[in-house]
Amino acid sequence: MSAVAASPNAVLTYSISELAQEFDLTTRAIRFYEDSGLLAPQRAGRNRIYTPRDRTRLKLTLRGKRLGLTLAEVKELVDMYESPRDTQPQLKKFLVVLAAHRAQLEQQMADLSVTLDEVRTHEKEVRRLLAASTGTRARR
């Protein structure tokens, strides 16, 4: 963390390396989020200078990613986060996104349950066939 100047109005800033270390990311991942429009650091020559706003946007991006949201969904929600302080539209949109994502996860869980049942059935059948073939060999 760096403070620009030592004045009382100093703005806290971060380097790409500091954010990468804090959030356990590669600098390449952070640059990818920049390319996706999620972050917009200032520049000082070739150096990127991230503000607390960028840090918050990165934190929200990673939270959305953990929830399984697409980057487009994350960007829409993060952009709404910075809109005027009327949080009702943000919260309603977030609720819609979460409900859709929950439904998708529940469907995946149901699909996995069916697949696991099929695997168990095949395992049971293979064990039965192995036991039958072992019993046949033992009788010879």
Image (cartoon, grey):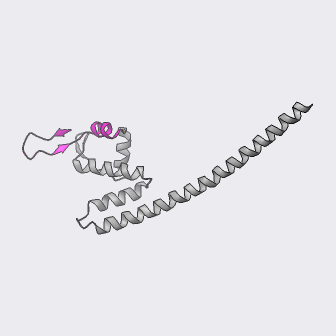
**What percent of the width, then of the height, locates residue 48?**
26, 42
Query: Which residue is depicted at the point 55% across and 56% down?
Result: 108
Work out which quarter of the rendered image holds the N terminus and state it.
Answer: top left
Q: Position of residue 33 (x, y in %)?
A: 36, 48
Depth check: 42 or 25 in front? 25
Which residue is pictured at 68% across the width and 47% down the height?
120
Q: Quadrant of the C terminus?
A: top right
Whether the magenta-drawn stretch holds residue 12 is answered as yes
Residue 21 in sight here: yes
Residue 35 showing in the rendered view = no
Left/right placement of residue 130 relative to residue 71 reads right
Residue 14 against residue 60 in the figure, above or below: above
Front residue (pair 44, 81): 81
Observer-nearest of 137 and 107: 137
Q: Is residue 44 shown left or right of residue 96? A: left
Q: Which residues are magenta?
A: 1-24
Q: Residue drawn 24% across and 45% down?
A: 50
Query: How many numbered marks have been drawn onto this rendered protein structure?
Result: 0
